[in-house]
Amino acid sequence: MSLQIGITPEKPCSYLPEQKDRLAVVMDEDWHSVHGYRVLMDYGFRRSGAMIYRPHCLSCSACHPVRVDVQGFTPSRSQKRLAKKLSQFDVVLKPTLDKNWFSLYSQYISVRHSDGSMYPPNEQDFSQFITASWSDVQFLHIYHQGKLRAIAVCDMFKDAMSALYTFFDPTLPLSMGKAAILLQLQYARQAKKTWLYLGYQVDQCKAMNYKVNFKPCQRWVDDEWHTEG
C-alpha cells in the first residue's frame, strides 16, 4: 500500500521556542483505520483528531516517539509509592465520557494550561481533538471516594494502547499525570497488551521527561526502535 504524505508549513515549536516545527501528514484515506494507524504508530506516527502525523522538521529531530513494554514494566521506588496511594482509587474503562467530564476538564485547563492553545476550554474543540470516526477511543475514568478525579483518553488496539490525553483535578496532592500512566499500564497488563504508546518525548522539555521513567521503554530514533532500561 502506498503512503502519500503532505508537509505542513513551518510554525513556532510548542516545546522548544527557539525552533520551528512542521509535520508530515498522512493523506491516503486507506490508512485512516484502526489497522492502518496501528501500523503507522510503529513508524513514529501519532494522531490528533483524524489527522495522522509525525514531526518532519528541517533543523531539529528532538521529538522521539516512546512506548513502554507493558509486560516487562518494572516500577521504580517512587512509582511503587505512587501505586500504593492509587490503591484507594477506582478505575473504570468506558466507551463514553461521564456527564460531568467537562467541569473537570475546564478546571484542569484553566489551572494548568491557561496559556495554551486549548484555553479557554471548549467541548467541541476537545471532541475534535480526541476523536476520529475510524478510531477505537476509550476513556479510563479514575475515581476517589466516588468522585471523578481524572480521565485518561486512550486509543485501543488488539496488542496495544496509546495514551492520547489526560486531564485531572489539579487540586489533588498527587502526580496525576504519572498516576494515569501507571493505571493505564495496569489495565494494559491485565488486558495482555504488549505496548503502551506515550507520544513524543523531547529531552530538552523538562515537563515531558517523566515519560522515559517508565521502563523498559523504547524510543523511535533514526527510523528504528531503541530499548532503554
Image (cartoon, helix red, strand yellow):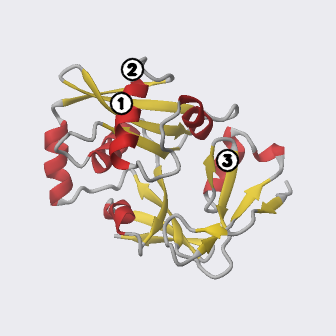
Kind of residue at disc 1: Leu
Residue that mark 1 sits on: 104
Give the percent coordinates (x, y) of residue 120: 48, 40
Asked whether 86 or 58 is in front, the reply is 58
Residue at x-position 48% and y-position 44%: 119
Q: Residue at x 40, y 34 (%)?
A: 106
Amino acid residing under circle 3 = Tyr
The quadrant in which residue 228 appears is bottom left
| Frontmost residue, 47 versus 110 | 110
Q: Mark 2 touching mark 1, by CB under 8 A?
A: yes
| Residue 31's disc number | none
User: In what element is the residue under mark 2?
Assistant: loop
For residue 229, above or below residue 193: below
Query: Is residue 64 found left or right of 37 in the rendered image?
Result: left
Give the distance between the C-alpha atoms of the residues marked 2 and 1, in whole angstroms.
7 Å
Which SS class for mark 3?
helix
Which is more N-terminal, label 2 or label 3? 3
Please give the name of the residue rendered at 81% of the width and 60% of the height, measured from the top-left corner.
6
Please tell me the numbered disc located at residue 37. 3
Q: Mark 2 belongs to which amino acid?
A: Asn
Q: Residue at x 37, y 60 (%)?
A: 211
Of the two numbered discs 3 and 2 in the rendering, the one whose residue sits closer to the viewer: 2
Q: Are marks 1 and 3 in contact (CB under 8 Å)?
A: no
Secondary structure found at label 1: helix
Label 3 Cα neighbours within 10 Å, binned few <14 / some 14-19 / many ≥20: many
Q: CA distance from mark 1 to mark 3?
A: 29 Å
Name the residue carrying label 2: 100
Quadrant (top left/top right/bottom left/bottom right) for the N terminus:
bottom right
* Residue 220: quarter of image: bottom right
Residue 127 vs residue 171: left or right?
A: right
Q: Quadrant of residue 72?
A: bottom left
